[in-house]
Image (cartoon, rainbow, N blue to C red):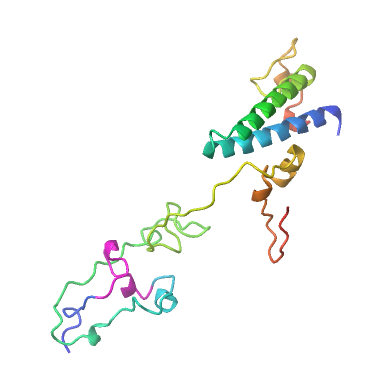
Amino acid sequence: MNEREILLRKIQTCNFVLQETALYLDSHPYCRQALRYYARHRRMREELVEQYESKYGQLTVYGGNAAGSWHWVTEPFPWEV
Amino acid sequence: MMDRRNSFAPRRDPFPAMGHGYAANPGNRMGRGSAEPDGGRFLALEPEDFDGDAVPIADPPAPEPRGAERGEEENPAGGMSCGGGPLEGYPLAMVYGPDQAWRELYEEEEALTNGTLFRELNFPFCPGCRKSGR
């Protein structure tokens, strides 16, 4: 795995545990441990996405653009990495 | 013997609210008559079991036609796409389960490969084996 793939994998992992936690929170909306876990991984995901987009361009069309061109189409799509 | 149509006798209906005698339907898919768990408490009585004094009552209403009979397409997964299925006709149920707790989490990477964040919810599909996946 190259660095880009590693970053993507980390983001994917964060997405997954966030989704799992969201499903848990749907039925336990006041569970402090789950809320803390969610907040921590959301921050982690934000940092990873920022890191990815600053190097490789947008991860989604809503993502930040590195500048110069519209990276969503000029760079490989995330699923092509 | 009285005219069969007019001497139709009441049957013990396990689900009277459903509007028609379930036990009076020998053609249903569940083979209910023989599988009755309490030893035939709902066994249907035939008109012949009653003497001539039975009060004549109307025939039970014909069951609703199934989807396929109405020209609808059968769902290949079983049952009709809008509900029903092999347990059609049984009363609906309320299902209860224990409340999940926030515990026994996998590490992030391990969660992704297992398809769940929670060890307690990891039930790998493994027919015939006892592996718990924990």
Residue at screen point 43% across, 79% down: B34
- Most extreme residue toward the top is A68
Where's the N terminus of chain B, which quadrant?
A: bottom left
Q: Measuring from the top left, give residue B122's x and y in whole percent.
A: 67, 50
- The quadrant in which residue A34 appears is top right
Query: Is B115 one of the magenta-colored residues?
Result: no
Q: Nearer the viewer, residue B29 or B50?
A: B50
Q: Would residue B76 be found to the left or right of residue B12 on screen?
A: right
- Helix, strand or loop for the magenta stretch, by majority: loop
Q: Taking B39 as reference, is A81 above or below it?
A: above
Q: Position of residue B94 (x, y in %)?
A: 43, 54
Q: Tell me which corner region of the image, top left, top right, bottom left or bottom right, holds residue B17.
A: bottom left
Residue drawn 39% across the image and 63% down it: B90
Residue furthest to the front: A32
Residue drawn where x is 50% and y is 60% of the image: B78
Left/right placement of residue B126 relative to residue B43 reads: right
B20 or B42: nearer the eye? B42
The question of residue B26 being in magenta is answered with: yes
**What range is drawn magenta here?**
B11-27
Residue B109 placement, left or right of A31: right
